Image (cartoon, helix red, strand yellow):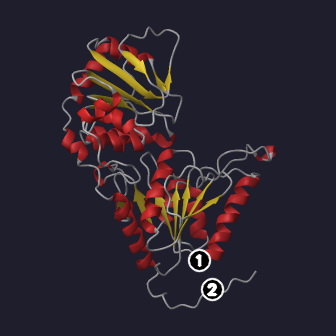
């Protein structure tokens, strides 16, 4: 193990991508220094090294029924996003992390994601790294966390950075495209179709429906599928139906599946929103791709979609097509995409490179303190 103390990592428990990213980086870091993951759940991490500590804390975002109702409507300052008053669960969570700061004397704290915990680390004199997301994040809350951070970790390629990111932010950002997502070794189209029992000659449109919102609306898919009777449209994930649909026979909703990689590899064309995991996997596979962003806080997906459009990586619509001609215009644009350009976006070893950057950052920050005496904690 290296000197300078362990690294702490706060993980938002609502989102598969956060947990996968944290696990990949922690597994790569553990060879050089201790790692403690803080999360409201300990069952969302896959294949963690046994040396990594997972410490559960109360959720920062979900009420428990113990909240003080008289303070629910009190205004919050511009520098925070989620800091309600009278929530004992938040008090307990912050106390647990602050106590760990005092006892572990960490070298670094990573937040994925919480502007408030980033500011807590700074106030506790602990250097922190904030995970950067797409979106309109120039508000005081985000900027307080970003400005106080010693570094920023972006789980996407520098080519996918927004034009409005300040130069000072870019200079301290490490880009880790595909970190935490298994983008290597996609099966080829024929191999994937053999697994799934799909004929090689069949034209397959795959709809990747995420689980972050209400679900993908099925009505627009009926329009697209009915306009292409010679193609097969299959959706995986959460789909929301409406009473007025008349689903065609070539549209099949499969629901949640355990092997989305096989389905992506088998597809001839892909339709999806643009959550980070979906984006990285489709880019790694290389496919003609139609993107319709979903509502997210701070317009995260709309900003990401604009970048994908700018780089020629996807055909983007800000809303679902409402007639067949709109679908055809999108497919015409999608057919012009260079799939090798898509694949080139994904880094080869993003987890290891991120861990190396973090470890190097620690060494730089704590240079000159190697021989300092151990801090005596007075209870």
Badge 1: few (under 14), some or many (20 or more) residues near its Cα, within 10 Å?
Answer: some
Going 47% across and 51% down the picture, which residue do you hit? 20
Going 56% across and 69% down the picture, which residue do you hit? 122
Badge 2: few (under 14), some or many (20 or more) residues near its Cα, within 10 Å?
Answer: few
| Residue receiving disc 1 | 105
Q: Nearer the viewer, residue 123 or 256?
A: 256
| Residue receiving disc 2 | 375
Marks 2 and 1, how far apart at CA? 8 Å
Residue 177: image x %, image y %?
A: 34, 53
Could you say whether the residue bearing mark 2 is in a helix, strand or loop?
loop
Q: Is residue 88 left or right of residue 166?
A: right
Q: Nearer the viewer, residue 42 or 294?
A: 42
Going 20% across and 44% down the picture, which residue do you hit? 341
Q: Is residue 94 left or right of residue 106?
A: right
Residue 71: image x %, image y %?
A: 77, 47
Decide: marks 2, 1 in contact (CB < 8 A)? yes
Q: Is residue 138 visible?
A: no
């Amino acid at each position: 193990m290296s000197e300078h103390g362990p690294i702490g990592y706060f993980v938002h428990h609502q989102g598969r991508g956060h947990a996968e990213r944290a696990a990949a980086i922690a597994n790569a870091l553990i060879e050089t220094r201790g790692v403690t993951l803080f999360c409201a759940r300990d069952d969302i991490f896959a294949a963690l090294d046994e040396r990594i500590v997972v410490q559960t804390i109360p959720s920062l975002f979900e009420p428990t029924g113990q909240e003080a109702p008289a303070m629910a409507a009190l205004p919050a300052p511009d520098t925070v996003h989620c800091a309600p008053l009278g929530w004992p669960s938040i008090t307990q969570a912050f106390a647990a992390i602050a106590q760990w700061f005092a006892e572990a004397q960490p070298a670094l704290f990573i937040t994925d994601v919480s502007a408030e915990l980033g500011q807590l680390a700074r106030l506790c004199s602990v250097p922190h790294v904030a995970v950067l997301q797409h979106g309109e994040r120039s508000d005081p809350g985000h900027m307080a966390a970003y400005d106080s951070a010693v570094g920023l970790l972006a789980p996407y390629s520098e080519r996918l950075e927004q034009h409005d990111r300040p130069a000072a932010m870019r200079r301290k950002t490490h880009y880790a495209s595909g970190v935490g997502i298994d983008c290597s070794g996609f099966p080829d189209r024929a191999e994937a179709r053999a697994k799934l029992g799909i004929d090689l000659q069949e034209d397959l449109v795959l709809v990747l429906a995420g689980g972050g919102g209400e679900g993908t609306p099925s009505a627009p898919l009926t329009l697209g599928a009915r306009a292409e009777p010679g193609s097969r449209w299959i959706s995986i994930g959460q789909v929301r139906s409406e009473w007025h649909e008349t689903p065609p026979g070539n549209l099949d909703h499969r629901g949640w599946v355990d092997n989305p990689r096989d389905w992506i590899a088998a597809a001839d064309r892909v339709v999806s929103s643009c959550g980070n995991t979906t984006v990285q996997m489709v880019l790694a596979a290389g496919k003609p791709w139609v993107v319709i962003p979903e509502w997210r806080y701070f317009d995260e997906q709309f900003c990401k979609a604009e970048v994908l459009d700018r780089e020629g990586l996807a055909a983007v619509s800000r809303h679902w097509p409402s007639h067949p001609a709109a679908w055809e215009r999108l497919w015409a644009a999608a057919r012009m995409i260079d799939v090798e350009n898509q694949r080139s976006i994904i880094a080869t070893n993003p987890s290891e490179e991120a861990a190396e950057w973090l470890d190097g950052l620690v060494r730089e920050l704590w240079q000159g303190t190697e021989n300092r005496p151990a801090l005596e904690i007075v209870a």
